[in-house]
Amino acid sequence: MDNSEIVLYLVQNGIVRITLNRPDKRNALNDAMIAALKGALRRADQDETVRAIIISGSGSDFCSGADLAALRKISRASVAENLEDASSLMELFLLIRAVRHPVIAEVRGRALAGGCGLALACDIVLAARSARFGFPEVKIGFVPAMVTAILRRNVSEKKAFELITLGDEISAGEAEGLGFINRAYDEERLEAEVDNLARRFGALSASAIAQSKRLLYQTDSLSFEDALSAGADVNAIARMSEDCRLGIERFLKKN
């Protein structure tokens, strides 16, 4: 399989579907797949017709984390080489937040280790009820290091500690209860529910969604006062947009 087939890219009616395509390897992450994912996200971000992005996995699993070859590389590499490798995955997680469009993870089967981090890095996670999530890195003496930053923003400190230090898998139902994912559906309904959500985003103001997404993540590192100030700036800018002007006109005509 050449690199162009490791990640599939399909755009239809303003919705991009990015599919991890190593089903025989449970869509495990390697350098080529990470690079292809970043390329696909940048391509979607530059397309003015796009309104939402879906990331899914081919076959029975979403993504099982690093593959065996990647693990062997980690065990033999120097500190500098491992830092460069980790930085590439970090860029992927940051890019998901940086693209303008909502990014939806569609999870079937297992989402483990870096694959679980990939799902959680998305703006919204919808999963089949049969899906499983977890960070098993500790079981091989490894640390779910970067994904901890994402996990900590999704669940309580106590639950995050349990998940990263025991390495247990949890069900989609438990993940939904923790706020780990947005919603779980019967598997036969999942794709339709994901497509419906993507179409809902497509019917809304692209500029308002992009500004809302950027502001939400920007406030992660801000004090309450600075977060309010950033919100005031975005508020003022949004009022000047064409989407806002037309939206207000439509609202006033109805009332």
Image: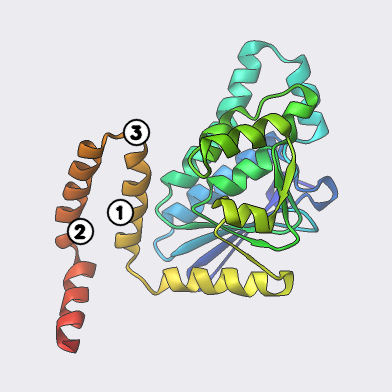
Label 1 packing within 10 angstroms: few (<14), some (14-19), many (20+): some
Q: Residue at x 36, y 71 (%)?
A: 204
Question: Mark 2 — residue?
Answer: 238
> What's the mark number on residue 221?
3
In the image: residue 52, left or right of residue 1: left
| Whole-number angstrom distance, CA of label 1 to CA of label 2 | 8 Å
Q: Residue at x 76, y 61 (%)?
A: 130
In the image: residue 207, left or right of residue 139: left
In the image: residue 188, left or right of residue 126: right
Q: Mark 1 or mark 2: which comes first in sequence?
A: 1
Placement of 21 over or under 35, stated as above or below: below
Question: Mark 1 — residue?
Answer: 211
Residue contact at pointers 1 and 2, CB within 8 angstroms: yes
Q: Residue at x 20, y 58 (%)?
A: 238
Mark 3 falls on what kind of element?
A: helix
| Whole-number angstrom distance, CA of label 1 to CA of label 3 | 17 Å
Residue 100 drawn at (x, y percent): 39, 53
Q: For this rendering, which residue is in front, 20 or 153?
A: 153
Q: Mark 2 or mark 3: which comes first in sequence?
A: 3
Q: Residue at x 54, y 45 (%)?
A: 121
**Amino acid, disc 2:** Ala
In the image: residue 151, left or right of residue 78: left
